[in-house]
Image (cartoon, grey):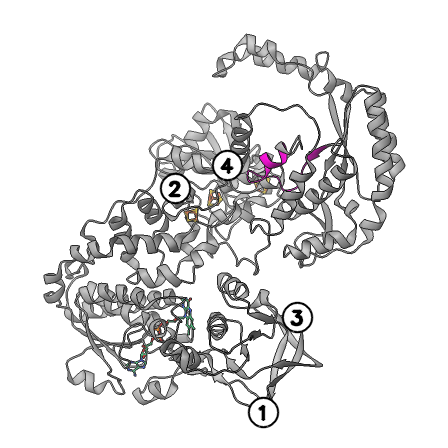
Amino acid sequence: AFIEGLKDASSTEAWRECREFALANLHRFKRVDAAYVERISPKISNSITLSTLHGCPPEEIERIAAYLIHEKGLNTFVKCNPTLLGFDFARRTLDRLGFDYVQFDDHHFLDDLQYADALPMFRRLQALAARSGLDFGLKLSNTLPVDITKQELPGKEMYMSGRALYPLTLALARQLTADFAGQLRISFSGGADALNAEKLFYAGIWPITMATNLLKPGGYQRLRQIAEGLAANPYPEFYGIDGEALEALERQVLKDKHYLKAIKPMPRWQTDQKVPLLDCYTAPCESGCPIHQDIPAYIGLVGEGRFLEALQVITRQNPLPFITGTLCGYRCREKCTRNFYEEPVKIRQAKLLAATQAMDELLQSLDAAKAGTQAQRGKAAVVGGGPAGLAAAYFLRRDGFEVTIFEKAHRLGGMVSQVIPDFRIMPEAVEQDVRLIRAMGVQFELGKEITSLEELRQKGFQYFVLAVGAGVPSQLPLEKGSYIPATEFLRQFKQDPFSLDLGKNVVVVGGGNTAMDAARAAKQVLGVERVAVVYRRTRRYMPAEKEELHMALDEGVEFLELLSPIALEDGILECREMVLGPADADGRLCPVATKVMVQVPADTVVSALGEKADTGFYGRLGIALNEKGYPVVTTGGRTNLPQVYVIGDGLRGPASVVDAIADAAAAVKEISTAARDTSGIKTEEKPRLTAGPAKIPAQYRHPEEVIRGKKGRLALSSDTILESERCLECGAVCENCADVCPNRANVSIDIPDRPMRQILHMDRLCNSCGNCAVFCPYDSAPYKEKLTLFDSLEALGASENPGFCLLDRDQKRLALRLDGGVFECRLEAEGSPLPKDIAQFLDVILTRYQYLF
Ligand SMILES: Cc1cc2nc3c(=O)[nH]c(=O)nc-3n(C[C@H](O)[C@H](O)[C@H](O)COP(=O)(O)OP(=O)(O)OC[C@H]3O[C@@H](n4cnc5c(N)ncnc54)[C@H](O)[C@@H]3O)c2cc1C
Ligand code: SF4
Ligand code: SF4
Ligand code: SF4
């Protein structure tokens, strides 16, 4: 009866009820009148899809399909499993695409329908359908059962779907298309999205269905882009499936980074904070950035060509836009919501573009005279002119200090100008940032090594920022043979690459960015034929950035994983083979030694095992050190010596430029507070210098409808200036929890005169699937932590969510839980215990969102 009802629902109770309701409520619709309702066809479907379970016997599949064709007269599709491809093919394909960590064995492949049995069956069913003037086809494909290895879900197996299933589904479609000469109808489910749907459609594959992709940010809005693309063309007749087009698609998948699994796993997406009850929208990129740059604002300003304003926004927190714009470690990008679409926004490139376009103008806008004279807060010495020292000097000048940088080398920039190769960053980029620091009125003494603070004190300096880096290389414990520390090798390479003689075979030991730079540099040295990186774990665990790894691989550097060097003798590096054992506290699998030895040809070994701080320097100054040889500090890098602060790599070992800037900002905040306390100058009176941005633009954002228009649209990055069209401005509109909920249990509530919409959770619609917790940028589960509407007092009592249930609509009487206990209140009663904004939120729900009750 159910199937008959789908074929023609006109005599069903449900049809009658819906039709009558629609006709009686026409006034509630905007674009629906009685004629429209009358035109809705009761013939809901003339086709059906049979979903086959894993292990379903072939004869049973055939019997049911034959029944649907013959008895029910329906066009019939049978949903097939990717197991039809065979274990070896599926395993190989997933491995090639980087999904080698997805584990499954061959038992489903052996138990399920076999390809050789399937072909004759499909032929029989196709012939049966043709005799009745119907279509028979296949829906490709069902999910693939894989092992649960990290307790992702209860049980032993879960189902793989979405992007990873796309290449398997495509391969199955291509194989069946070849065997049926294109004459077998195929409908597609398995990772379709806006980047491939049209290609599948015009290859002759339809209908196309989507599920997993709709459960990601953007949700159902992802369908709009596909619909627009398809609607632009006439609906084609089915003449057959184009096998060549499928082959081309399959070839493209194997090299398209959209389908390849990232070389390294994404770090955790969420911030450490809990979601607030109200006004929760946040830009996750900003929380990922150690100096919390206002990223959406400068992306938007760059998009409008307002480069100076963009650079003003950037230099509020970041005085090194060229250096960071070129090689910042990019933690913002890892947090970007667009990772769930196709690729992150090109944040770093937008910063560099703003700096390149507007630095001259920014410098002209600096009030040089003011910068030169207005320094009433004290005299500060910065020891070390690397990124940390430069940033500290800038912030100190901005806060009104007289500042001198003492640098022992003859150029500024630290590791960036002395060690990092030119193919990563050119000296001109460092010089551009130095121009800004110089324009702020900072003094420099180059070629001046500081060995005691007394000398500086005698010159009148009151505040000391030690930014001396971590330049002492770690030891590589070789039983025989010698090695060159990577920083030393890179320093020589930068000065004069032609002076180096490394032999033919170079081995770089280590897995960080320095190892990648050393390996790529070694590749460029005359006479070198082979460069290999030797690492104790696998590349998935290497600390180097993904981009650096890719570049080294692209340039032909070999990766020898799971090897630990033991001795170098006669051009051979003897290494012990390792295996991955249990995870350490950070979740990284620990290498465990085996008895197997491996010989690697090596004329030169470069050790990139990291650098340490110069404990002797700190010791001579009297700075207390911890057991690792780093200064013991409190907030802002404050040491045991009065007014002496340590920042940058010298504080905790090799880190990054942006970490150095963050340290500098924190130290200067402390110094400014200390100076205010001693000078008696109030904060608001402090002579704050400006890096130009006397008129900092107001918070930049597009109108809300423009931001909403970007939701759900896939767009690969094409041009940095256009990145503002890709940036979703997450701090202005988030609603991920609403987008991704399969049950529409999170509702975004529009409150008049409030800039942000608020999230209301619907208790009765939620089945606790947890998907909203996966995509909320906070360390939170919206379905447990956002204000919740309950249907009854019992439901409110059975939950711990903050929320309410309606007791009396006319009186606006509610039972409410906010901070633990449940209490009753009337919304409009005088002396209501409710905070004003919560009361307003509840009132809007009661008056404007009645359909929710
Ligand atoms: C090969 C390599 C690649 C890297 N790649 C990246 C990257 O891609 N992205 C990124 O963000 N970071 C990268 N880093 C890390 C980054 O360079 C450092 O984190 C950053 O330079 C630290 O800045 P700093 O000012 O603390 O120290 P440093 O850059 O080491 O600067 C310290 C300065 O102090 C001076 N000095 C030391 N002692 C004295 C003294 N007694 N008196 C006067 N001057 C003194 C030194 O000469 C030096 O100029 C890389 C590092 C290396 C080695
Ligand atoms: S989409 Fe834009 S606002 Fe959102 S995380 Fe990415 S860069 Fe930031
Ligand atoms: S947990 Fe509840 S609210 Fe969250 S996505 Fe699942 S059903 Fe929706
Ligand atoms: S996912 Fe929902 S609860 Fe989390 S920040 Fe976005 S709108 Fe707020």
Badge 3 crowding class, 10 Å Cα cut-off, few under 14, some 14 to 19, many 20 or more, is few
Badge 2 crowding class, 10 Å Cα cut-off, few under 14, some 14 to 19, many 20 or more, is many
Alpha carbon distance from label 4 to label 1: 72 Å
Up-down relation of residue 851 to residue 267 (above or below): above
Q: Tell me, yes or no, if residue 665 can be seen here.
A: no
Judged by depth in the image, the label closer to the viewer, 4 or 3, is 3
Determine which residue is flagged by label 3: 582
Up-down relation of residue 164 to residue 589 (above or below): above
User: Where are the magenta residues, as a range?
Assistant: 186-201
SS category of the residue bearing label 2 = loop
Give the amino acid type for the residue marked by disc 3 in the picture. Pro
Q: Is residue 191 one of those drawn in magenta?
A: yes
Give the amino acid type for the residue marked by disc 4 in the picture. Phe
| Spot occupied by residue 189 in the image (x, y as percentages of width and height) | 67, 38
Q: Which mark is residue 732?
A: 2
Up-down relation of residue 167 to residue 3 (above or below): below
Q: Which comes sooner in the sequence, label 4 or label 1?
A: 1
Q: Nearer the viewer, residue 711 or 505?
A: 505
| Quadrant in the rendering for residue 587 | bottom right
Give the amino acid type for the residue marked by disc 2 in the picture. Ala
Q: Nearer the viewer, residue 361 or 475?
A: 361
Alpha carbon distance from label 4 to label 3: 46 Å
Which residue is at a point 20% across and 54% down the rendered structure image? 361
Q: Quadrant of the N terminus?
A: top right
Q: Which comes sooner in the sequence, label 4 or label 3?
A: 3
